[in-house]
Image: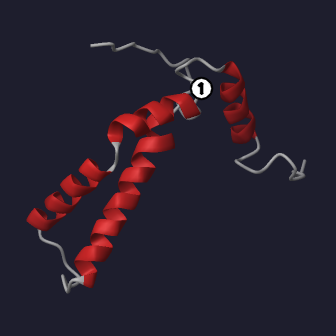
Amino acid sequence: MGILLILFPANATHLLQPLDVAVFSTFKACIKRQADIYLGNGGGCSLSKEDAVSMASTAWKLSNLEANIKAGFRGCGLFPLNKLKMAERLDSFLRNGTPENTKLAE
């Protein structure tokens, strides 16, 4: 099956979240588009369970999961292993996500 098990270092999961990096953000954007379509077609302000599941299913299928999962692991520097990317994510985290050229208060 080609599955490689990767163990995250203790207390580092907030830095190495491949699903947050690429998968969930895309899925949420697809859900939002589905909701906009639903509302634009006169769906009203409420949503039945059936419609919600249908929207989520459509969004999941449109999320291009395989490519996004791979992009998430690559973006976090997990696979292929890229310690420079990991260090960049750590630096960004330590700077609260601010760009490098921003002067931080001490």
Taking the image as shown, residue 30 lies to the left or right of residue 86, namely left
Give coordinates of residue 11: x percent, y percent. Answer: 57, 25
- Identify which residue is drawn at 35% across, 66% down: 32
Q: Is residue 80 above or below residue 97?
A: above
Q: How many marks?
A: 1
Give coordinates of residue 77: x percent, y percent. Answer: 59, 26
Q: Is residue 13 above or below residue 2?
A: below
Q: Amino acid at mark 1?
A: Gly
Residue, disc 1: 77
Q: Name the foreground residue: 67 vs 90.
A: 67
- Identify which residue is drawn at 20% across, 86% down: 42
Give coordinates of residue 102: x percent, y percent. Answer: 86, 53
Taking the image as shown, residue 21 lies to the left or right of residue 27, namely right
Q: Residue furthest left?
A: 50
Q: Quadrant of residue 90?
A: top right
Q: Quadrant of residue 87?
A: top right
